[in-house]
Amino acid sequence: MIKKIIVSACLLISFVSFAQQGTASPYSFFGIGDVRFKGTLENRSMAGVSVEQDSIHLNIENPASYASLGQTTFTIGGTFGSSTLKTNEGSAKAQRSTFDYLAIGIPMGKFGASFGLIPVTSVGYKIQNDNTGTDGATSTQLQGKGGVNKVYFGLGYKIKKNWTIGADAQYNFGKITTTSVELVTGVQNATAETNASELSGVGFSIGTMYQTKIDKKLTLFTSLSYAFATNLTSDNTRVIAVDGDADPVVGDPHEDKLKLPNKVTFGVGIGEPRKWLVGTTASFQGNGQLANYYNAADNVSYEKYQKYAVGGYFIPNYASFTSYLSRITYRAGLKYEKLGLVVNNQSINDIGMNLGAGIPLGNGSFSNVNVGLEFGKRGTMTADLVQENYFNVSLSFSFNDRWFVKSKFN
């Protein structure tokens, strides 16, 4: 059954993953767009805390986790988001639906493997300055779409029962298209400039996870991962067109070199497996070299990224046969992020809260449906900037099955 689901999902995602607009943030204009959360909804519902060596839930934030899988796991997720964009002059609302990830994890004795498709960044904005009521004034409209995706393959190895290591290799690819339209009131024709950047590059990451018993019930969990700096090649083209002109001006194509900085993430947690967990995670990333030729600006710079999160889960009784609600996993988390972007001398930060639930699919099944809620605030209205108040509803499916097991009966 799980194999049929995987084939159908892969066909669907191949059509929709590149056409979606994964963000509605004006801050996605800068760099290569908004950086998306890398992990599954189970971890996202705990604000990104992912320190436990889980045998039935795929953890794609640390490749060392693959060695702990007990069953083949297929997971897919998506999000519907709503944002209110506020400035000192007014506000506007935006909505979008996004594909978040598709991943498969396969246990292989002391080894474990995983591969999948994950959006890395998203660009999606539409900004309009309407001065059509003033003769001779210029009205502008900026629009951007696209982003960077990655396919990855990772391998984990269990050194000891409580200690695993792992590594990922990723191929990053995508296209970002921006359009700027200018119209002078009283002038018949408008001018449109379209910039397109095709990005590609290879990245690598490593990780380790360790857990140890504190007493008969409590276990200490630790996690450490490191993503190496990734070079991206950006092949750029520019087209300038004027209404009524059949021959647009095509600029000479050229190549830029961008750099995603290295990133280290470590976490620690304490809990009773299959009962509860409380943990914390911290991530640090160096300065990026992300300004492309079409979005470089004097009032924009990049700083070190930081994230701090605390979260956990609670399962009343995972083995209950009499109470379905007792087998549900309840999750929550809080996060604070410095996004690494500075505009008008203001650091752009993100503060949010997550809630979620993992709902089992039938008795005796390790498969589940996950629902998550996320709300928070990004940016500021200081220095004529934009504050985003966002609310996201996420849904994912996690199917577990045993593959490569020889049948005992014909």
Image (cartoon, rainbow, N blue to C red):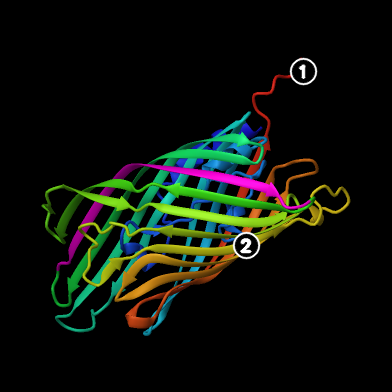
Q: Is residue 271 left or right of residue 4?
A: right
> Tag 2's secondary structure?
strand
* Residue plotted at (31% across, 63% down): 30
For the residue carrying disc 2, how many other residues have a C-alpha within 10 Å: few (<14), some (14-19), or many (20+)? Answer: many
Above or below, 141 relative to 74:
below
Q: Is residue 330 visible?
A: no
Amino acid, disc 2: Gly
Q: Is-magenta flag for residue 308? A: no
Where residue 328 sits in the image (x, y, percent)? 75, 54
Where residue 362 sits in the image (x, y, percent)? 77, 44
Where residue 387 sits in the image (x, y, percent)? 42, 76
* Residue plotted at (61% across, 46% down): 210
Decide which of 377, 272 is in the foreground and name it: 272
Question: For residue 311, which numbered disc appears in the image?
Answer: 2
Q: Is-magenta flag for residue 191? A: yes
Amino acid, disc 1: Lys
Question: For residue 316, which numbered disc appears in the image?
Answer: none
Contact check, label 2 and label 1, Cβ < 8 Å: no
Q: Which quarter shows the C terminus?
A: top right
The part of the chain drawn in magenta is 189-215
Q: Considering the whole magenta stretch, tell me its main secondary structure.
A: strand
Between discs 2 and 1, the one toward the N terminus: 2
Q: Which residue is mark 1?
A: 408
* Residue plotted at (73% across, 45% down): 361
Q: Is residue 199 left or right of residue 53?
A: left
Residue that sits furthest to the front in the current view: 214
Q: Is residue 98 left or right of residue 171?
A: right
In front: label 2 or label 1? 2
> Tag 1's secondary structure?
loop
